[in-house]
Image (cartoon, rainbow, N blue to C red):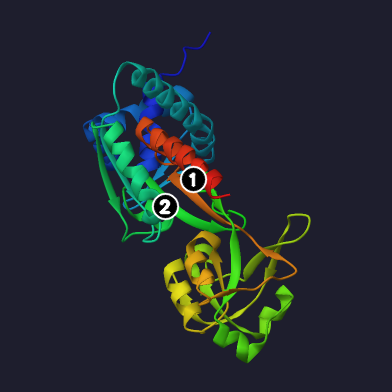
Amino acid sequence: MRDALDLNTVRVYAAVVDEQSFAGAARLLALPSSNVSRHVATLERRLGVRLLERSTRHLHMTEAGRLLYERAKPLLDALLATEEELGAVQRELRGPLRMCMPGEAPRLLAPILAEFCSLHPGVELECDTRMTGLESLREEDMDLAIVFHRGRQDDSAFITRELATLPSIVVAAPSLLAKTGTPRHARELKSLPCITTLSALKGQPWQFLDAAGEIVKVPVRSRYRVNSGELAGAGALQGIGFAILAAFACQEDLAAGRLVEVPLDLRPAPLQLLGAYSHRHSVTARVRALLELMQVRLAVAGNAGS
């Protein structure tokens, strides 16, 4: 009977893959680099296969190495999550939580973040509104990114958790409608000036839902492309183009007649508020607790507003 794999050597190997270097894994695990190399070499001897191809600048998994990582990583993450959950029963949440969100998100989330830190005084929160999008998870050591998204999610490199679904509407200024007339069909927008919100649509065509709930993409013309719903709303107010906005964000302008809702044959795909984290990082008890609080509070706010 063969000896069981040493779970610690597998954990070290997964850290090398996650950090893309032996030195990075050593820093992450607080081990000497020589120990990291020895663990990986021991694992390769135990399995009788090469797991990593090494060069002066890069590490690449072999086919065997990729198979081991893909099978072992979810198990390691599950063990860590279980350990944290069991420990959280006995102790309060402590430690750093680094996150980022787009500039318009605090309107929804600021009270929830403050409540979370009040409930958990051992948590050290850092929230940056200058870095946005999933790119921040790739380039920065962030635990969590809050993002707005519309339509299907297509980036499997990240785990996302839906926090809220925000109904959206097409709006325009009265001055624009006086020039263009009021469209009745989504396809008419192809020939009309529109405002593209890059943070939600990533420069793609506008996305609508048909009667069956399927995504319908409508390519639109845009000379005003912005990375903020607030900027898109400001452009719409000036009559620059039609805009898809979250309904909650433009109620005052609709009530005052500064914007007009444009009913079409297709309804805009709703705006999703997502919490995202990388596969590279096991979700911590701190992140999990914050996401759960956000879901609960946003659900209550949504029910109160409906």
> Which percent across, then down, holds residue 215?
70, 60
Mark carried by residue 301 = 1
Q: Residue furthest right?
A: 212
| Element at label 1 | helix
Q: Residues within 10 Å of mark 1 (few under 14, many from 20)?
A: few
Residue at x 48%, y 79% (from the top left corner)? 237
> Which percent across, then down, holds residue 39?
33, 27
Name which quarter of the figure residue 154 lies in.
Answer: bottom right
> Disc 2 marks which residue?
108
Q: Residues within 10 Å of mark 2 (few under 14, many from 20)?
A: some
> Which percent across, then down, holds residue 270?
60, 57
Tell which tag, 2 or 1, sits nearer the viewer.
1
In the image: residue 273, left or right of residue 184? left
Q: Are marks 2 and 1 in contact (CB under 8 Å)?
A: yes
Residue at x 63%, y 60% (from the top left corner)? 269
> Which percent across, then down, holds residue 289?
40, 33
Residue at x 49%, y 26% (from the top left corner)? 75
